[in-house]
Image (tube, grey):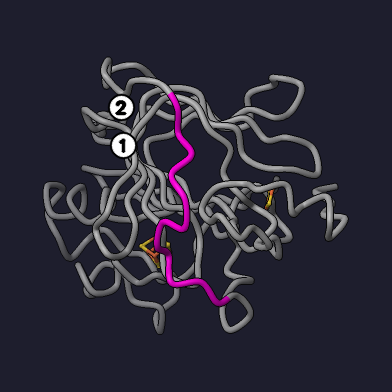
């Protein structure tokens, strides 16, 4: 998993942007075009807006590519409940108190916002790098409901563990939200990240059939 972080600052705020996590969803450009202008260099300039407006838009970035500091601290707090939204033809958009760990348990990332590859094509697994664009066809509905356990205790963190050559293992209270607004809640499950499951968004073992590799 790679990072490429750029920093933009003025007297009030420091905005950071991780190019490797940006999939050009454009929530920032649409939210505050004077600050986030892809046709300008540098493309982020905090000067034209106040800190509150920048904070609001930074926290809309679904991938966590954008973060900010005010007075040396990140003002963002984790939402009360963890959720994973299925983006049509695209990634799993995670919001919550999230810890991403590898198959050995080493922490890859702690964040409140993440976009996780579910098509199998990203070169920056387990994060999405935009490779799904035009190459992955899935409307993001629940073809199965395979979360077990009680999602109560929503304040608990959500741990997502990457299985080598296999799914994303969810541990902790979470609600999975489909594009048709149907939901599935629980504490334990395996989410497909190879793109081949017939039980999307959950793993059905198809990664073995297609010899999916995550190396
Ligand atoms: S909102 Fe985030 S992912 Fe979307 S273009 Fe802006 S920085 Fe990139
Ligand atoms: S990771 Fe896709 S079926 Fe298991």
Q: Quadrant of ligand 1?
A: bottom left
Q: Does the magenta stretch include residue 138?
A: yes
- Residue sitting at x 41%, y 44%: 94
Q: Looking at the picture, does residue 80 appear above or below residue 202?
A: above
Q: Look at the numbered discs 2 and 1 and tell me whether their residues touch, using CB distance below 8 Å.
A: yes
Secondary structure beneath label 2: loop
In the displayed structure, does residue 213 sit left or right of residue 21? right
Give the residues drawn in magenta, as a range.
137-148
Label 1: element kind: strand
The residue lying at 77 percent from left, 52 percent from top is 207
Badge 2 local density, few (<14 within 10 Å), some, or many (20+)? few
Percent x, y for residue 190?
58, 37
| Image x and y of residue 12, in percent | 21, 42
Q: Mark 1 points at which residue?
A: 69
Label 2, label 1: how many angstroms apart (C-alpha)? 5 Å
In the drawing, what numbered circle is on residue 73? 2
Q: Is residue 164 above or below residue 171?
A: below
């Amino acid at each position: 998993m790679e990072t490429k972080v750029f920093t933009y600052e003025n007297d009030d705020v420091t905005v950071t942007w991780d190019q490797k996590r940006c999939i050009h969803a454009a929530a920032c450009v649409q939210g505050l075009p004077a600050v986030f202008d892809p046709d300008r260099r540098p493309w982020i300039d905090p000067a034209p807006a106040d800190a509150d407006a920048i904070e609001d838009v930074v926290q809309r970035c679904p991938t966590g590519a954008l973060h900010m500091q005010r007075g040396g601290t990140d003002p963002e707090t984790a939402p009360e409940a963890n959720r994973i939204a299925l983006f049509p033809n695209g990634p799993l958009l995670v919001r919550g108190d999230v810890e991403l760990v590898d198959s050995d348990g080493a922490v890859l990332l702690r964040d409140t916002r993440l976009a996780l590859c579910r098509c199998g094509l990203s070169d920056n697994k387990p994060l999405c790098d935009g490779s799904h664009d035009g190459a992955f066809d899935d409307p993001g509905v629940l073809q199965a409901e395979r979360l077990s356990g009680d999602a109560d205790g929503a304040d608990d963190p959500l741990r997502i563990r990457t299985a080598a050559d296999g799914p994303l293992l969810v541990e902790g209270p979470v609600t999975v939200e489909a594009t048709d607004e149907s939901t599935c809640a629980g504490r334990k499950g395996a989410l497909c990240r190879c793109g081949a499951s017939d039980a999307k968004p959950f793993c059905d073992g198809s990664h073995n059939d297609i010899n999916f590799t995550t190396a």
